[in-house]
Amino acid sequence: MKITVVSRTRNEDGKKVPSRSITVEYEVGNSLSEAVSLFGEEVVWSAAKAELLTSVRDRVRPMLEAGKSDEEIQSALSNWRIGERVSAPKSGLKKFMKLFERLSPEERAETLKRLSANI
């Protein structure tokens, strides 16, 4: 299997930017049984468990940042299965900007005119 790895460094603005990449070949198998044959059940379970826990953390983190209560978070997890995609709620501004970008130049001008009249 080909795996691309990218290293990142911080630029003068402090943002992480790609600095070097490499594509390497490493056999991980094409199925669960192949992976177990290559690495053993304990290694495969350990890797799977780490990824599963990361999925749970990635699901919970935005809810923590949004100020959800412990009960709301636990309830959301009770109704979610790892592997299901969950779209993050968008702010009103993000929704507006996405729609605004789809408008023609004339529609944008009219929208800006109407918005400035209401300020």
Image: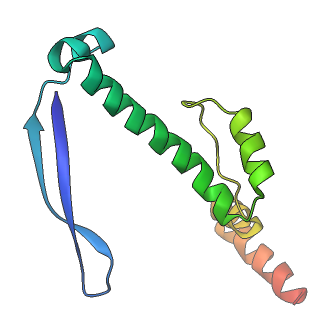
Q: Position of residue 82 (x, y in %)?
A: 56, 31
Percent coordinates x, y for residue 87 in the rendering: 64, 45
Seen at 79% across and 50% down, the residue is 72
Q: Work out whether 4 lies above or below 68.
A: above
Query: Would you identify the image quadrant in which residue 94 lies?
Result: bottom right
Which quadrant of the structure image shows residue 69? Answer: bottom right
Q: Quadrant of the C terminus?
A: bottom right
Kindly identify the residue that appears in the image at 11 percent across and 30 percent down. Answer: 26
The picture places residue 34, in percent across and down from the top left corner, at: 23, 11
Q: Position of residue 97 (x, y in %)?
A: 67, 67
Answer left or right for 37 relative to 107.
left
Q: Is residue 3 left or right of residue 65?
A: left
Instruction: Name the side, left or right, on which 8 lies relative to 73.
Output: left
- Which residue is at 33% across, 77% downward? 15
Quarter of the figure that contains the N terminus: top left
Q: Who is closer to the viewer here, 99 or 113?
A: 99
29 relative position to 109: left or right:
left
Of residues 90 and 10, the one nearer the viewer is: 10
Say above or below: 46 vs 22.
above
Q: Quadrant of residue 27?
A: top left
